[in-house]
Amino acid sequence: PRSTPLYSSAASDVYKRQLQINGTERGLNLVEAFAKVTAPWANSISLTAGVMNRPFGFEIDQSSSVRESPERSRYTQILMPNERDLGAKITYEVGKNHPLHGLRMDAGFYNGQGIAVPGTSSQTGSFVNDGVNEFDFAKDFIGRLSYYKTSPDKPIRYGLGVSHYNGGVLNQSNVYCDHLDNGPNGLVFAAADTLHGQSFKNTAAPRMYLGSEFFLSAKSSLGTTTVRGEYISGTQPGTVDGSRSPSSLPAQKVTYLRHFDGAYVYFIQRLGQSKHELVMKYEWYDPNTRVSAGDLNGLNGMTRAEIKFTAFGLGYNYYHDENVKFMVYYNVVSNEKTQIPGYFTDLKDNILTVRMQYRF
């Protein structure tokens, strides 16, 4: 679990700053370091700059200290690993006395490479090094429009939101596999046409996401019942081996463009007025929606990078007090059954997590 902010200052309503680090068995690393300035003539407008959460969807911005499951969804960990990036954003929030209070807009530009966390930011054979390098001159745009509201008598809370990511990943060569064709053994990745003078080297393969979110929470005699979820789809540049967003230039210079989708849904039930909570979560990440399990034979780009994963989790949380939380969570992970060696059947990769979390 991440620590709470190491340093946070709010000397005035106009200027705020925050510094947070991670301390784990892998060492120390920067989590976030940003400054936020609010316009003194309009408290609803602010500018934030530095290393911060990407403003995309609900799950990325939700603190690990209050999340109901051990980890974020698979698609979040692959598409936007370590959640944060270096950039700047403008935020507009409707004032408290306005009928549309609860409406918020975030829009900013980011490096796109994210931040490095020791032991999580590289994959053997896929990236040149463990550092985070700005390997192009382009910036990625991220925007989110959300509306979260509490009913006047406060038994119901609800919210909706949409997010957009518009960026790219550098093509290191003129070979750019951006579509599928029929081959002698089924579907294959095919390279874009370069016979008519078109050059792809040093251009950007589109990294485009569109996301939506919903939230509904109601209090009753049974306790607080919450349903929350997100859906995301778009295009993701990657390598033949995977679709993970790179923190460094991939050692494999051929770019593979995939059309993906992913989602999660939570059902959370607090038991009456007690400190006990039950959790169910269903999620999936399909890195290539244009192929099926029968197409995956390990040939011509049809590798394990195209395999769809789903997961169903059951959990129990006990909130001892505002600082201490106990969690037991079992996640049943399933993969598509393919013709790829090692993936003929479902992997034995279910995960049991037992955690005591202290927040300070």
Image (cartoon, rainbow, N blue to C red):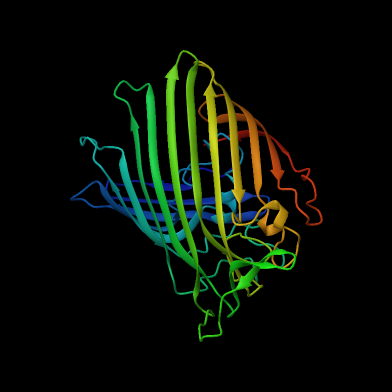
Q: Give x and y (percent) for residue 329.
A: 66, 32
Instruction: Say whether residue 242 is visible.
Output: yes
Q: Nearer the viewer, residue 15 or 268?
A: 268
Residue at 61% x, 56% y: name it.
288
The residue lying furthest to the left in this view is 41
Q: Give x and y (percent) for residue 79.
A: 55, 55
Q: How many marks?
A: 0
Q: Nearer the viewer, residue 199 or 34?
A: 199
The residue lying furthest to the top in this view is 221
Q: Indicate left or right for 157 with 194 as reference.
A: left
Q: Give x and y (percent) for residue 353.
A: 69, 36
Residue at 58% x, 60% y: name it.
116
Q: Indicate left or right for 186 with 33 as reference.
A: right
Image quadrant occupied by the N terminus: top right
**Based on the displayed image, in which of its 4 quarters is residue 314 positioned?**
top right
In this view, 107 is above or below 283? below
Residue at 49% x, 38% y: name it.
229
Q: Give x and y (percent) for residue 170.
A: 53, 73
**Based on the displayed image, in which of its 4 quarters is residue 192 positioned?**
bottom right
